[in-house]
Amino acid sequence: MGGLDLEKEIIYVTHSLLNLKDGGFLLKDLMTKGSIREIALPPNLIPLFKRYQVQRFRVKDLLQDEWQDSNYFFVFANEFGLPYYKSYPRTKWMRFLKRNKLRYIRPHDLRYTSATFLLSQGIDLKTVSVRLGHSTTRITADIYAHRTQETDCVLPRPIPSFYTRNHDLIAYAIHRE
């Protein structure tokens, strides 16, 4: 079962979300067994997730019968505990970029950035491949290894402190709307 374990500081990725035309959703199996994975959360994000979880439980208690969640903890969920439609996180992302006068990058580009950064920091290919849910390290190498070689010499060194320095900005952006 997928979910968020804040004691172990892990997100379990076990399904993908399929939005239905009628507004409903299905949780479907991931494409490969390698896609099922555990992702360690950065320690500085744990308090943010804990506050969010407490807030969600309070709303659930207030709404009682109107609360419609499943047994999953959806990070992008509406006030009733159900997952947002797939375009909603992108819409929020676009607002965040505009409000903070940042250039446009696709949310998926964050995945590329993360993988490239991890490889450039010497994290082994197998570990990065597992984190991304790739079925083989070859997929990871084909997509990301050349980027690491090309960008290593120009990669800014202060990136590791980004999350620490911008924790409040990230928390504010997630909970603003």
Image (cartoon, rainbow, N blue to C red):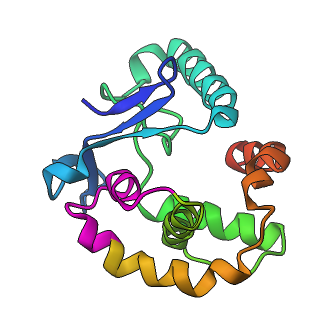
| Residue 154, above or below 139 | below
Q: Position of residue 88 (x, y in %)?
A: 51, 60
The N terminus lies in quadrant = top left
Q: Nearer the viewer, residue 143 or 11?
A: 143
Whether residue 25 is visible here, answered yes or no, is: no
Front-most of residues 56 and 147: 147
Q: Is residue 35 left or right of residue 55?
A: left
Q: From the viewer's perspective, is residue 50 above or below residue 136?
A: above
Give me the residue at 53% from left, 77% from top: 148
Tell me if residue 124 is in the magenta stretch. Answer: yes
Seen from the viewer's position, the closer of residues 45 and 123 is 123
Q: In the image, is 127 to the left or to the right of 9?
A: left
Side of 98 where 23 appears, left or right: left
Q: Give x and y (percent) for residue 46.
A: 63, 29
Of residues 59 and 149, the one nearer the viewer is: 149
- The residue that appears at 68% across and 47% down in the rendered structure is 174
Please indicate whether residue 22 sits to the left or right of residue 114 in the image.
Answer: left
Residue occupying the far bottom of the picture: 150
Dominant SS in magenta: helix
- For residue 78: magenta? no
67 in relation to 81, above or below = above
- The spot of residue 20 in percent (x, y) is 24, 58
* Total numbered labels: 0
The residue sitting at 41% across, 44% down in the picture is 83
Query: Which residues are drawn in magenta?
Result: 123-140
Q: Can residue 145 be seen from the camera position used here?
A: yes
Q: Position of residue 41 (x, y in %)?
A: 54, 37
x 42%, y 24%: residue: 67
